[in-house]
Image (cartoon, grey):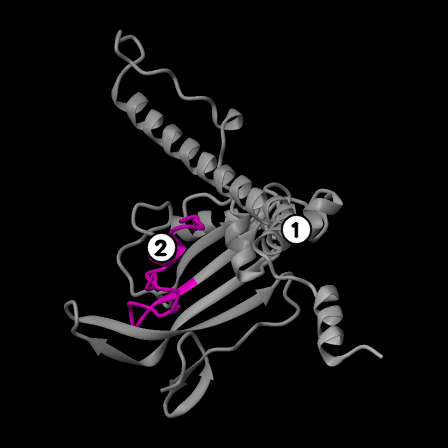
Amino acid sequence: MPTTHQTQRLTNRYLPRFTCKNICLTVLTLLLLTLPPLIFLGAIPWIRAYRYEQAYFSELTRLSTLDKQWSYIPDYRPNSPRKPPAYNKRVLPLIHDIPQLKSWSWEEQLDLYDDGSMLSKSPDKETWIYVGGTPKTSKSWVDKISLSRRPGGSCVDSGEICGAFNEGFNTLMERYHDFEEGGEYYDGPKERMSKAEWAFMDCDVSPLLCDEFALDPVMLVHIRSMKPCRVETQHGVSWVCGMRWTLVSLPLRQMPFVKTIRIGGVCGTGFSECA
């Protein structure tokens, strides 16, 4: 019968030894198992989407600069720039004449604090955001499990619905600008019934932004400052207000909310909430 000392020696012989070599091999094995999926499903799709969006906005900036140069310098001058391409042969925003949100500056564009708090700098902020895109194309299984969607078709509805809403929203914005100063139907300054602003997201171009909010076109996002607000004086006087976010799926089956106005002490349907 083995003694206690012999039993201890036999037991220690078969126990795993945590040597530097074993630890390094374990860490290396874990890295080999986890890094490739993180790189191919996370980092590469994110970089691809970011570079695509940057290239898109860089092209819009280049075309805008080219248009301005061309409008001031006649073609016959020797130092005239290259003629801008025709509108049917250039990159165009999905929606015209309203701000397009970018994945790296959407908080600043919406007048929000850029610290991730989703707080507004204005007590009277109200914005309608149209979320649009072109019909979704078939994706590979790699795209389906990637952490960032591939740039391109993003609208989950049929092609007819996607195209109709994009065209309809463009028409709505054209009519909206027609009644502004300088527009076709402008007939003098008037108090607007709503102070809401307009913006849009193009999920084809900015998949990182749409992924951040988990949005699929087509839909509307309504944001509005919530009162009461507080005033901070740490770096000058500034407002800090909460925000209410409302997601509205399209097409609408019913109005997302009804606003009312007080007339003669009675609330009725209108354009501002009853006090």
Q: Is residue 115 highlighted in magenta?
A: yes
Q: Nearer the viewer, residue 35 or 131?
A: 35
Q: Quadrant of residue 77?
A: top left
Which x, y percent locates residue 268? 46, 84
> Is residue 248 shown above or below 81?
below
Q: Quadrant of the C terminus?
A: bottom left
- Distance in Å between CA atoms under marks 1 and 2: 45 Å
> Residue at the location (61% across, 61% down)?
18
Q: Which structural element holds mark 2?
A: helix
Q: Amino acid at mark 1?
A: Thr
Q: Is residue 211 left or right of residue 56?
A: right
Q: Which structural element holds mark 1?
A: helix
> Residue at the location (56% across, 54% down)?
20
> Residue at the location (75% across, 65% down)?
14
Q: Is residue 65 highlighted in magenta?
A: no
Question: Where does label 2 land, which residue?
Answer: 109
Which x, y percent locates residue 110? 37, 59
- Which of the marked residues, 1 or 2, is nearer the chain's N terminus? 1
> Is residue 198 shown above or below 206?
below
Which callout, 1 or 2, points to the residue nearer the camera? 1
Q: Nearer the viewer, residue 191 or 103?
A: 103
Q: Is residue 275 left or right of residue 54?
A: left
Q: Is residue 141 left or right of residue 86?
A: right
Residue 167 in view, yes or no: no
Question: Where does label 1 land, which residue?
Answer: 29
